[in-house]
Structures are given as C-alpha cells and as structure tokens.
Image (cartoon, grey):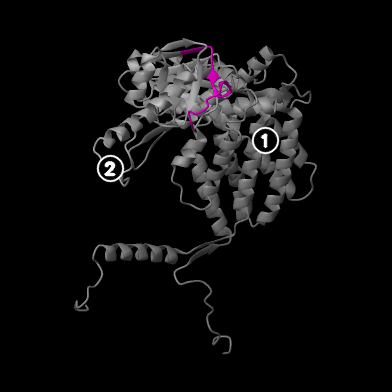
Amino acid sequence: MSTMMQPQIILLKEGTDTSQGKAQLVSNINACGAVADVVRTTLGPRGMDKLIHDDKGNTTISNDGATIMKLLDIVHPAAKILVDIAKSQDSEVGDGTTTVVLLAGEFLKEAKPFIEDGVHPQNLIRSYRTASYLAIEKIKELAVSIEGKSLDEKRSLLAKCAATTLSSKLIGGEKEFFASMVVDSVLAIGNDDRLNMIGIKKVPGGTMRDSFLVNGVAFKKTFSYAGFEQQPKKFENPEILLLNIELELKSEKENAEIRLSDPLQYQSIVDAEWNIIYDKLDKCVKSGAKIVLSRLAIGDLGTQYFADRDIFCAGRVAEEDLQRVAAATGGTVQTSVNNVIDEVLGTCEIFEEKQVGNERFNIFSGCPSGQTATIVLRGGADQFIEEAERSLHDAIMIVRRAMKNSTVVAGGGAIDMEISRYLRQHSRTIAGKSQLFINSYAKALEVIPRQLCDNAGFDATDVLNNLRQKHALTSGEGALYGVDINTGGIADSYANFVWEPAVVKINAINAATEAACLILSVDETVKNPKSESAQGEAAAGAMGRGRGGGRGRGMRRR
C-alpha cells in the first residue's frame, strides 16, 4: 500500500519530449544514414550533381559535399554533426568532404546490428578508436614523399594531385588545363598562407578554355566618371599610389553653420572648398604616381584632373583587391596625401585595361613581390561558373596542403582497400569481441571503392572481389591497386597518377571516426518544445500589441 501512495516525481517541464535507450541510438544512426545517402552519389569522377533550390529562388548546382551539406537545412540534432565534419574537412583540407560524410555514415551502419544485439556502445567506441589509430599509422607508412624533387618534377606532381581533385568536379573534362593553372597560382603566392591572395574573378560568356591566369592582380573596371576615357589605358613600369580617401568635392555637413557679415565672404568659403580638393589632387600628381587607386570615390573633377595629366585613376576599388594590389606591387595604402614618399608607392612591369567578355579588367602583371595571382574564369551559365569556382577552391587547397605536407597516397579507393585488408588481418590477432568491431570498421572502409563503382555504373561486387584478391597478395604488389574508372576494372592508381595528399585521408578518417563515436555515445535526447512555443507566443504577442492588438483602456473584457 505504501508503495502505491508515493508521489509522482516531476523533473522536467510538462511537454518535454525525451527519448532514450537503444531505440534512440538506432534512430540517430538512421538519420545519419539518410544524410550520407544524399551525398553518396556525388563521389568520384562519375559522381552526379545536386540541384538545390532555396526559398529565395537561388539555384545552386554542386558536386561538393560541403556545399551540399551547408545548403541542406538539416534540423535533426544528430545528423547536424555530419554537416559539421564536412565543414571542418572543407576548411582544413579543402577536399574529401563527401568521403568524410560517407565514411561516418558507413561506420554507424556497421555498428547498428551490434547495437541492436545489445552490445554496449562504449565497447564499439573503444574498438573504433583503436582501428582509427592503426589506420592512420598505416597511411603514414604507405605515403610517398615528394620532398627533395626539382621544381619541374614537383610542379608535375602537384598538378597530378590537382587533377585528381578536379576529376570529380563539373570541370573534370578540362582538368589538365585547370590543374596547371592552379599549381602556377599556388606557386606564385609562395609561402603566403592567406588564401585571398589568389583572386578568382568570374566573367560569364566564352568557354572554359578562355579562362586565364594573371601573375599579378586583375579586377573589374570600377564605376567611372566623365574624363575616364581620356586617361591612358596602358603603362610600363608605372608607380602606383594606393589611397583610402575620397577625392571629390564634399559639401559641408547639414548641421554645419557659418555666419557671414558680408555676402562677399561667401565666395572665399566656396574657394576654400575648391582649394582643398585641388591641393589633394596636386599632391597626388607631385608624388610621381602614374596610377592612383582609392577604396573610396574619386569624383568627376579628380577623374578629369588626372586625365589632363596622363594619369590613370580608379575609385571605389574593393578592399580585398586593393590589399592584393598592395601585396603584389609593394605599395602601402595611404590614408592621407600629405608627405607621400617614394617608399609607399608600388610598381609593376605592365599595367593595362583589357576587354574580357562584356567586362573591362584592370590588369597589373609582372609585379616585383609576385605574392599574388588572379584566375579569370569564363563559362556559359552563372551556376556553372559558381561551381567551377568552388572546384578550383578545392584544388587550390589541395595543392597548398600537398606543398606543406609533401606526402601523397594512391587514390581511386586503393588506400582504403589496403587499410581495410590490414585491419582485417590485425583483427584476427585480437581475442574477444573487439575482433568483430575492428573487422566491421575495416568493412566500412570499402564503401569508397564500392561507391566509386556504383556511381560509374560498374558491377561493384566484381570489382571489389578483384581488388580484395589483388590486395591480399603476400608480395604486397597489389597495395596500390584501385578502381579504374575508365575501363571498369582495376588498375595501379599510383602508376595512373591518381594521387591525393595523405593529409586528406588522415583528416577524413579522424573526423569520420570522431563523429561516429560521438553519435554512438549519445543515449538520450531531451527536447523541450514548450520553451520554443513559449518564445514563439511571446514574439507573436509582442507583434500583436505593437500593431494595436492590445486591449485599450475602457474596452470591455471578453
């Protein structure tokens, strides 16, 4: 009787949704599987593209895992973790975003039957972490260094890495053309870590082959005033003055007050305004600069003044373009025209204004410091050029990583199969349940070559059996064999120059294992919809009151 009389304990707010236990974990695994299925078909050279249409009417066509994950408005709390690892892979390495999501999804899929059979998640997590550590050590062992090679050799090796990345993108048909362009641009900025030193400008029209690389800075012609067309459009070895001030007549502020006792004094005030602007323009001319660029406006008076003295000027230049001009030409952006000394002026070999498609571009080439490059992209549709820009961003990141961590591994699923074989072999030396878990981790790694085959329309079972047989050879000669996308068979990926930086694989396996372990370690989700609806009601109430929805004085209560 006493047990029946015990009061009910209420811990959480009424309406709180809690789900816990095995069912909760399986539900999270299913949600992550659904996310992985979205990007599954985009993997590899024969991967399909996704067309994403948002509520503002913008259309994005993309093959890049991170871009797709960002644009999908995922609300499931566990599945959001996969979005985060795709973003981190993109910012850290630049490529392998689809791989990381697929691997995480596959690790969870392999864990699901064990969870359903009552295995404790912590046992799985421990084994997955061990397997991840072994896999990364094996990658480091198999990686081939490209250090100590001559510049030409290094350039061709980096171009191979860039071509591997670009082969799975929309511009894969022209991968050799773009790969050499990407390598040249990365080598141009040298050891500078700032990615914005490589500018990518998009000009609709023409074909992809019309794209070109400027060893320097190029930016679109800015808004111009009368007199601009009278300015010279080409200089050799000019001095360049960079400013962050306005060179135009400014009216006084509205609240400025000047009291005059004599109407004739008004002219002296007007003259003073003119003298200030003429003084500024005169100082720019006396500095000896032949090109004047400013982040703020250069008015019609200034434009005509410079045109009469054979000086080129451009106002309202974008901040990042101005910074790149400063880095390339060795100039310094000035906030005053007083005391402009030679040291703050930049220079370049050739400056010219060129027509590219419908746009006119100001191009600075042969810059002394050479710490910057600009890729001008051409193409038919806007969405196509946008996707080409994202693809080049990935390739640029990969080449930078390959230069810094100069080790590469064989792509095309070769490294995944080799690690899978190694882990299977290792698992047989372990007694206990851990053997099964590491074996399932090894099986999950096979998702990469399997998906490459599926996306290309080949028989995945056949190809994987061939790969397993090749990798199982005791001589170790099959370690570099991966999927041959062109024939539907298997081939030596390393000999076919399908390479990727080791850091891509290491990062992908690390991030995917971390995400899988994180999702496996969650056993309860508490959702409090009450507070959300309360906030919504409060906001609606505030809006209603603001619009006269509140009860006025003297109104009858309902």
Q: Which residues are magenta?
A: 336-351
Q: Which is more toward the observer, 392 or 513?
A: 392
Task: State which quarter of the image contains the C terminus.
Answer: bottom left
Q: Residue at x 41, y 26 (%)?
A: 279
User: What's under tag 1, amino acid-wise?
Assistant: Ile
Name the residue rendered at 33%, 24% in the picture.
301
> In what element is the residue under mark 1?
helix
What is the x, y in percent for residue 449?
A: 60, 30
Residue in the picture at 79% in, 45% down: 430
Q: Residues within 10 Å of mark 2 (few under 14, many from 20)?
A: few
Which of the 4 quarters of the picture holds residue 138? top right
**245 displayed left or right of 497:** left
- Marker disc for residue 452: none
Q: Quadrant of residue 97?
A: top right
Q: Position of residue 139 (x, y in %)?
A: 72, 32
* Left or right of 450, for residue 436: right
Furthest residue in direction bottom, as rendered = 1
Q: Nearer the viewer, mark 1 or mark 2?
A: 2
Would residue 390 be found to the left or right of residue 130 on screen? left
Whole-angstrom CA distance, mark 1 to mark 2, is 76 Å
Say how many tags the image has. 2
Label 1 crowd bin: few (<14), some (14–19), many (20+), radius 10 Å: some
Foreground pick, 121 / 556:
556
- Quadrant for residue 104, please give it: top right
* Amino acid, disc 2: Leu
> Which label's residue is closer to the chain start, 1 or 2?
2
Q: Which residue is mark 1?
A: 506
Q: Which residue does the numbered mark 2 point to in the structure image?
A: 260
Q: Position of residue 474 (x, y in %)?
A: 78, 26
Secondary structure of the residue carrying numbered label 2: loop
